[in-house]
Structure formats: structure tokens, C-alpha cells
Image (tube, grey):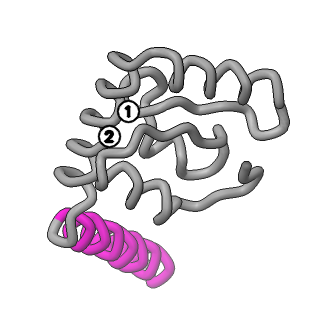
């Protein structure tokens, strides 16, 4: 399991394919997984917690199907190319606005 993670492309791809997911509670994984809704998050260095998560996912067909469907919907609705482009543009616009604000303050 990852101890350090950005936004995991592999995790996002698994979710988009409708696979139930369990991931480390590290980095960007919490942006993709709402525990118990779109998958399970587990502390990376806790083998007992990983065992419990695997037992829950493998032992409960209804739960596994629920998180697989919810994860697929999230991935296919929120992480499309157009939505990613919108978010990226918003970050750049915010950075430009901050830079202009700082430049204006310096010129005073």
C-alpha cells in the first residue's frame, strides 16, 4: 500500500471500470474515496486494518456492488477530461489573479 500518493490514476481507472476499491488513506486517495460509499480507505501501515477491509469487501456482496457502482459513477462524472480541464483552468485563473494582486500591492 502507498504511504505517499498523489491522485492515483490506477485507483481512478479501477473505479471507472466499476471495480470495488480499497486504498491507503494517503495523499489524494481521500479525494476519490468516501469511506463506505465509493470504497474503503485504510491506514497504510496497519495490516490488521487491511485484513478487516478485505474481509468486509470480499464478504459482503451487496456492499461490494454498492461501492463499485458509486465509484464508477464518481469517476465517470467528476473526472472526465472536460471537468479536469475546468478545474485546471480555475487553478490557473486563481494563480494569475493572486499574482496580479501581489504585483499591484508591490507597486504602491
**Picture coordinates of residue 47 (x, y %)?**
83, 30
Q: Does the residue at mark 2 contact the one at mark 1 (Cβ under 8 Å)?
A: yes
Q: Is residue 50 left or right of residue 32?
A: right
* Residue range (magenta): 83-107
Q: Position of residue 37 (x, y in %)?
A: 37, 24
Quadrant in which residue 68 is drawn: top left
> Which residue is drawn at the image coordinates 48% and 54% (left, top)?
11
Q: Say if the magenta span includes residue 59.
A: no
Q: Residue at x 19, y 63 (%)?
A: 83
Vertically, is 38 above or below 26? above
Residue 21 on image: x %, y %? 48, 40
Q: Closer to the N terminus: mark 2 or mark 1?
A: 1
- The residue beneath circle 2 is 71
Residue shown at 66% from the left, 42% from the top: 24
Question: Does 58 sit above or below residue 85?
Answer: above
Q: Residue at x 51, y 25 (%)?
A: 57
Pointer 1 local density, CA inside 10 Å: few below 14, some 14–19, many at least 20: many
Q: How many marks?
A: 2
Near-viewer residue (104 or 11) = 11
Q: Which SS does the magenta portion mostly show?
A: helix
Disc 2 to disc 1, C-alpha distance? 4 Å
Helix, strand, or loop for circle 2? helix
How many other residues sit within 10 Å of disc 2, few (<14), some (14-19) or many (≥20)?
many
- Circle 1 is placed at which residue position? 38
**Apparent side of residue 100 relative to residue 49 in the rendered image (left or right):** left
Left of 103 or right of it: where is 97?
left
Magenta-span inclusion, residue 105 = yes
- Element at badge 1? loop
x and y, in percent, of residue 82 in the image: 15, 70
> In the picture shown, does residue 48 fall above or below 82?
above
**Quarter in which the C terminus is drawn:** bottom left
Amino acid at each position: 500500500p502507498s504511504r505517499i500518493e498523489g491522485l492515483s490514476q490506477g485507483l481512478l481507472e479501477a473505479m471507472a471500470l466499476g471495480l470495488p476499491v480499497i486504498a491507503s488513506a494517503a495523499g489524494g486517495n481521500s479525494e476519490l474515496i468516501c469511506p463506505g460509499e465509493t470504497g474503503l480507505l485504510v491506514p497504510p501501515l496497519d495490516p490488521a486494518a487491511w485484513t478487516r477491509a478485505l474481509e468486509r469487501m470480499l464478504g459482503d456482496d451487496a456492499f461490494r456492488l454498492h461501492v463499485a457502482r458509486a465509484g464508477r459513477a464518481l469517476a465517470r462524472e467528476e473526472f472526465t477530461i472536460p471537468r479536469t480541464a475546468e478545474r485546471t483552468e480555475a487553478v490557473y485563473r486563481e494563480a494569475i489573479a493572486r499574482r496580479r494582486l501581489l504585483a499591484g500591492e508591490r507597486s504602491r
